[in-house]
């Protein structure tokens, strides 16, 4: 439940922004971090909870890919397309 | 390239496991308290790599699992109201209350919507002014600030038909309760990575200073976890407990102070009931008086009544680390991921579900 996924900030307007990973982009709340466009953040429940440096982010993303491929985790919601019918 | 990296990592994991074997001179019991750690440890077969003297336990690290039946029952009571739309994270809907689950209530026609973010629940309330939208807020310190920010948003956006049933729990007080439990024997803790992102490594200092149990904040790769085990064993063996941070790439000493300020502006720490652990002082969050009108308990006059756990289900003992899932007579017999009886089997990151998925196969 405390899964958090690193994603890249591609847009920021005040406390709202857009993050992107693997071609999936989502709206995100940026209340808790001062991350700017181009920086990586950890996303949990639609909020960025921490800034993270690029190399750590890329390492973690690779780990996610491997864990997903091995069936060790379910596809994080962050990486699912956003238009799934319900909000 | 990937195989090279994997090989290296495997080599490193084995090397660190060797260091643990060289250091350990007595039986040591370490506990993790994070569903993602539970999954990672079993997935990578870490219990089989480390020396036999090192016992690994899963504690109360799955928020859905530690949520007491009284909370589920209150949510089910809400689901019977014609005017209420319940919004929740996915895992919670399958957890059985004393009579039914939200999943079954949904099949019977109750309005239960799974959301990805608590902010989505606020937006849904805006879109459906004829409904009372209630967000079922469970989760540890990782999640609580996101709910607090959503409560503030609802107020700022004048969304009057939104409220929250608060069931948040705080991790450090539960660790202290476990150390005070005579049936539980734990020498140190692998502390949860993303809870620590919010609360900071320093939040575990009372556990070290007052109870002498070492704490290491760990990430989720096999190397992260085994390295944390090595540090913990070293500190147990030498008798010099400390808080150490093996996940510095996202965890600082102070945590995310902005998220913590938001969390404590909206919520305050209160005594709280955990499944299996009972009531623990200052281990849960409740809405502050200033936000009382956004509290579903006040809005709907709910009463949280303590109820006995399902007969035969030993989830509570599993959550305390007092027994292993296979010690429960229901495990893998009547209780399976397809037909879960207790929450530790319901949640994909519950200890029983992890055991079922990885250990049963071996």
Image (spheres, coloured by chain):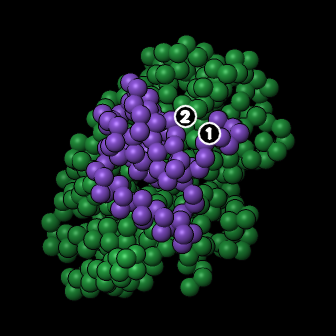
Label 1 environment density (alpha carbons within 10 Å; few <14, some 14–19, many ≥20)? some
Q: Which chain is purple?
A: A
**Image point 52% across, 40% down: which residue?**
A26
Q: Which residue is mark 2?
A: B118
Q: Are marks 2 and 1 on the same chain?
A: yes
Q: Colour of chain B?
A: green
| Residue occupying the point 57% across, 57% down | A75
Chain holding disc 1? B
Label 2: chain? B
What whole-number distance in Å separates the C-alpha atoms at marks 2 and 1?
7 Å
- Which of B69 and B204 lies nearest the eye of the viewer? B204
- Relative to B295, residue B13 above or below: below
Q: Which residue is mark 1?
A: B115
Furthest toward the top, the residue is: B158
B306 horizontally vs B201: left or right: right
Asked whether the beta carbons under mark 2 and mark 1 sit within 8 Å of each other, the answer is: yes
Q: Report helix, strand or loop for mark 2.
A: helix
Q: Quadrant of the N terminus of chain B?
A: bottom left
Q: Position of residue B317 (x, y in %)?
A: 53, 63
- Residues B126 and B168: in front is B126
The answer to whether B26 is drawn above or below residue B271 in the figure is: below
Q: Please give the name of the residue rendered at 72% of the width and 44% of the height, measured from the top-left corner.
A: B102
Which residue is at 69% across, 51% downward? B94
From the top left corner, tell me how far across and down residue B105 is, in percent. Answer: 78, 42
Describe the element under mark 1 as helix, strand or loop: loop
Q: Is residue B181 above or below residue B361?
A: above
Where residue B184 sits in the image (x, y, percent)? Answer: 41, 65
Q: Quadrant of residue B212?
A: bottom left
Q: In this image, B168 relative to B125: left or right?
A: left
Asked whether residue B286 is in view, the answer is: no
């Amino acid at each position: 439940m405390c899964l958090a996924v690193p994603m890249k900030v591609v847009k920021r307007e005040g406390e709202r922004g857009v993050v992107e990973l693997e071609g999936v982009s989502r709206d995100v709340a940026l209340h808790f971090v001062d991350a700017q466009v181009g920086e990586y953040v950890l996303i949990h429940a639609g909020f960025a909870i921490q800034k993270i440096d690029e190399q750590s982010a890329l390492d973690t993303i690779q780990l996610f890919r491997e864990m997903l491929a091995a069936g060790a985790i379910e596809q994080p919601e962050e990486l699912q397309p956003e238009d799934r019918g319900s909000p | 390239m990937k195989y090279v990296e994997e090989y290296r990592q495997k080599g490193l994991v084995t090397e660190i496991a060797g260091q643990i074997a060289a250091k350990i001179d007595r039986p040591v019991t370490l506990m993790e308290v994070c569903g993602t750690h539970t999954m990672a440890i079993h997935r990578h077969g870490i219990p089989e790599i480390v020396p036999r003297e090192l016992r690994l336990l899963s504690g109360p690290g799955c928020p859905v699992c530690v949520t007491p039946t009284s909370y589920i029952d209150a949510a089910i009571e809400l689901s019977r109201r014609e005017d209420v739309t319940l919004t929740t994270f996915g895992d919670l809907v399958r957890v059985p209350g004393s009579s039914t689950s939200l999943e079954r209530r949904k099949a019977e026609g109750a309005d239960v919507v799974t959301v990805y973010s608590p902010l989505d629940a606020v937006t849904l309330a805006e879109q459906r002014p004829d409904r009372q939208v209630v967000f079922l807020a469970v989760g540890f310190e990782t999640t609580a600030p996101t709910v607090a920010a959503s409560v503030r948003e609802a107020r700022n956006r004048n969304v009057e038909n939104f409220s929250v049933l608060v069931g948040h729990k705080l991790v450090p007080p539960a660790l202290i309760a476990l150390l005070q439990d005579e049936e539980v024997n734990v020498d140190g803790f692998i502390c949860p990575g993303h809870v620590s992102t919010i609360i900071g490594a320093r939040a575990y200092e009372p556990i070290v200073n007052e109870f002498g149990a070492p704490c290491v904040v760990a990430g989720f790769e096999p190397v992260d976890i085994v390295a944390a085990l090595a540090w913990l064993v070293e500190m147990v063996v030498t008798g010099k407990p400390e808080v150490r941070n093996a996940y510095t790439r996202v965890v600082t000493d102070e945590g995310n102070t902005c998220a913590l300020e938001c969390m404590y502006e909206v919520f305050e720490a209160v005594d709280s009931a955990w499944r299996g652990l009972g009531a623990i002082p200052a281990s849960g969050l409740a809405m502050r008086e200033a936000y009382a009108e956004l509290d579903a308990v006040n809005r709907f006059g709910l009463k949280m009544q303590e109820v006995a756990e399902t007969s035969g289900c030993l989830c509570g003992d599993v959550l305390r680390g007092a027994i292993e899932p296979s010690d429960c007579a229901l495990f893998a017999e009547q209780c399976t991921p397809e037909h879960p009886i207790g929450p530790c089997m319901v949640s994909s990151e519950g200890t029983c579900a992890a055991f079922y998925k990885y250990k049963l196969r071996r």
